[in-house]
Amino acid sequence: MKIENIPWENKPDNCNDIVWRYSKNPIIERYAIPTSNSIFNSAVVPFNDGFAGVFRCDNKAVQMNIFAGFSKNGIDWDINHKPIQMLSGNTEMIESDYKYDPRVTFIEDRYWITWCNGYNGPTIGIGYTFDFKEFYQCENAFLPFNRNGVLFPEKINGKYAMLSRPSDTGHTAFGDIYISYSPDMKYWGEHRCVMKVTDFEKSAWQCTKIGAGAVPILTNEGWLIIYHGVINTCNGFRYAMGSAILDENSPDKVLYRTKSYLLGPATTYEMVGDVPNVVFPCAALHDKDKDQIAIYYGAADTVTAIAFAKLSELINFTIKDSL
Ligand code: BMA
């Protein structure tokens, strides 16, 4: 995809990493709208001559909800002060006690949104919009409990495909990534395991649970995914970012997967916040011709940040550093 005004900053001279942070992070502060306690784990896409996004803004009662936002440059955002009000999509309106951790994927003719939907516990909600003004809520994809539902940007073998992470009602101390398929965005099946957590001895940062992050990017090597991996330390969970490449036609096959994390909590805004030590990617913008990718991530469950990489370097590293 070509993105004229993709956010970008060159790698600092003294940086040896594949992924580097934007120097003016965080791009969205916790109090960016009047009601917010925190704005993080949010998703953006190119829209018109700029960008649009769906943002997780927890309010000061710490209720989780999703809000639409717009930007000319992908860095400075105007987030609506009112949460998204859903109309009924492919079913009658279904309950939603809360909404969090949205992802946005353009498929065919519209923007599809998935999020963690409160329906007797967390599961994957699905909705769509054409204009980021009117939103339509569809059937939940799965039974509770599930999190981190991420749609592929095109059908695979004629079906919609979604990654997800079956979980529990609480702060889930386990979790592997699965894929499911649907002919119509309503009924989901053919569930297959894609990747499991690692052995502690081999790659400890992803040994407790993993979950899909950004929408998969189709490359010459296969589907590039950017995901989060978690280790349970003596002081609680620590969330970092890694990448993997899945087979183009059978994306339940993992071809490569980084042993090292690409970005872990290391700056103040990643290490200090409502939930310390969280780097949680939910979206990425890329331009293949420019060889650029901008990754959006929630930091410490409080603010939103971006990091950059050269797409080719990220792919090569995923292959070279593979487990
Ligand atoms: C997960 C989700 C995420 C959050 C993470 C770290 O279970 O709630 O929204 O970023 O925990 O607290």
Image (tube, rainbow, N blue to C red):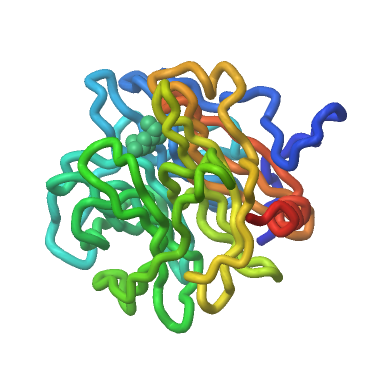
Q: Is 299 positioned to the left or the right of 137 in the image?
A: right
Res 92 seen here = yes
Q: Residue at x 46, y 75 (%)?
A: 155
Please tell me how many numbered marks the rendered image carries.
Answer: 0
Q: Is residue 220 above or below residue 263?
A: below
Single out the residue that lies furthest toward the front. 201
In which quadrant is the N terminus drawn? bottom right
User: Residue 247, image x and y in percent?
Assistant: 58, 72
**279 sits to left or right of 258:** left
Q: Position of residue 172 (x, y in %)?
A: 30, 41
The quadrant of the rendered image in which ligand 1 is seen is: top left
- Depicted 21 relative to depicted 163: above or below: above
User: Measured along the vertical axis of the image, is residue 6 above or below residue 171?
Assistant: below
Tell me the quarter of the picture where residue 288 sits: bottom right
Task: From this view, report whether residue 255 is shown above or below residue 183.
Answer: above
Q: Can residue 80 be seen in this snapshot?
A: no
- Quarter of the image with the C terminus in it: bottom right
Q: Pick out the residue farthest to the bottom.
A: 158
Seen from the viewer's position, the closer of residues 136 and 304 is 304
How far from the left and from the top, in percent, is residue 117? 24, 47
Instruction: Please give left or right for residue 175 compared with residue 121 in the image.
Output: right
What is the x, y in percent for residue 275? 40, 23
What residue do we see at 53% from left, 38% from top? 205
Corner quadrant of residue 92: bottom left
What residue sits 22% from the left and 20% below the top? 61
Residue at image x 44%, y 18%?
A: 273
